[in-house]
Amino acid sequence: VNQTVSNSIAARWWYWARENLFNSWLNTILSIICIVIISNAVWGIFSWAILNGIWEAKDRRECFAILGKDEAGNPIHGACWAGVREWFNNIIYGRYVKDEQWRVNLGISILIVWMIPLWVPNLKRKFLIGFGAIGLYPFLASYLFLGGERSWFVSFMVSLAIITFCYNTVDWLGVKAFRVSLADSLRWKMVNRIFAEKQHTFAVMGLFAIIAVILAFLIQDWILVDVSWVRMGGFHLTLVISGFAMTVGLPCGIILALGRRSRLPIIKAFSVTFIEVFRSVPLITILFMATAM
């Protein structure tokens, strides 16, 4: 049976290749050239990363010394994985305090779990989930990453983010496990007894606000160690910057695109000027020159 299945799979692959890669003499030549190029590239990467890779070394010079030279006297190229392993923590976290790196892990894990419902089918209010991630998560993440003293407003927003995160998690887990929104069931059972149907949304919003105030009062004494923003770096900082850029850039881009089609001359001129200037002079170039100078 296994041999029959493997033969049928091979036959399908051969039929696909014959119909798409070798269906004419020109496609056959191009396909062979591409196969040779890809094979050489894959073998080169495999040789550089695995066969010639150095896993034990004190520094980069020792990596070069271990690699040595070939018979023609040319230096042998290989990956220095010893340096990557030694500096892996700095690559991921930069100079972030080692004892506080759990906060970075927790913040990124919360974001991943927060965004999972957007890919869960048959789940309602995905727009609100995304809006909560954009409007509330930054307060929670910024406090986790930076810590220190916080105002009542920040405490309230952090509490609201925690409540929203728990609500969303219970909701999508219920839909995934039982095909029933547990959050909706609890919400309507609690609200239906007190408020009319038209007042459900305001009642739930008020309930969230009350719980957030209570939670903010309870966590007021929960203060994380202050970590200066200059210690942020590595892959963590890349995620923060890219997340902020996408979160702010998408709505700003939509607003500017709408402004470019506006009939008001001032709004249209501003939108067109802003779009063309930042398209011709990318912001990354400005940041690079500012750093270099």
Image: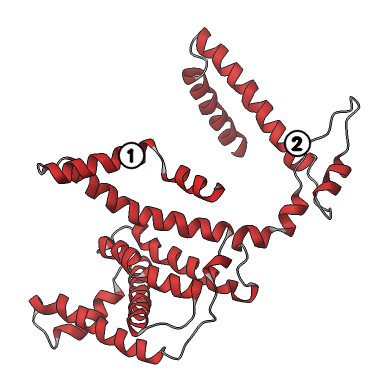
Q: Does 108 sit left or right of 177 as displayed?
A: right
Q: Is residue 286 above or below residue 87?
A: above
Q: In the drawing, what numbered circle is on residue 277?
A: 1
Circle 2: is it few (<14), some (14-19), or many (20+) Cα within 10 Å?
A: some
Residue at (84%, 47%) from the top-left corner? Answer: 61
Per the image, label 1 sits on a secondary structure element best described as helix
Circle 1: is it few (<14), some (14-19), or many (20+) Cα within 10 Å?
A: few
Using the image as rendered, state which of residue 137 and residue 142 is in the foreground.
Answer: 142
Q: In the drawing, what numbered circle is on residue 47?
A: 2
Residue at (60%, 39%) from the top-left corner? Answer: 2
Q: Position of residue 113 (x, y in %)?
A: 43, 66
Using the image as rendered, state which of residue 224 and residue 13 is in the foreground.
Answer: 224
Picture quarter containing residue 177? bottom left
Given the current orientation, which residue lies at the most extreme front position?
Answer: 293
Given the current orientation, which residue lies at the most extreme right position?
Answer: 71
Q: In the drawing, what numbered circle is on residue 34?
A: none
Using the image as rendered, state which of residue 18 and residue 192 is in the foreground.
Answer: 192
Per the image, label 2 sits on a secondary structure element best described as helix
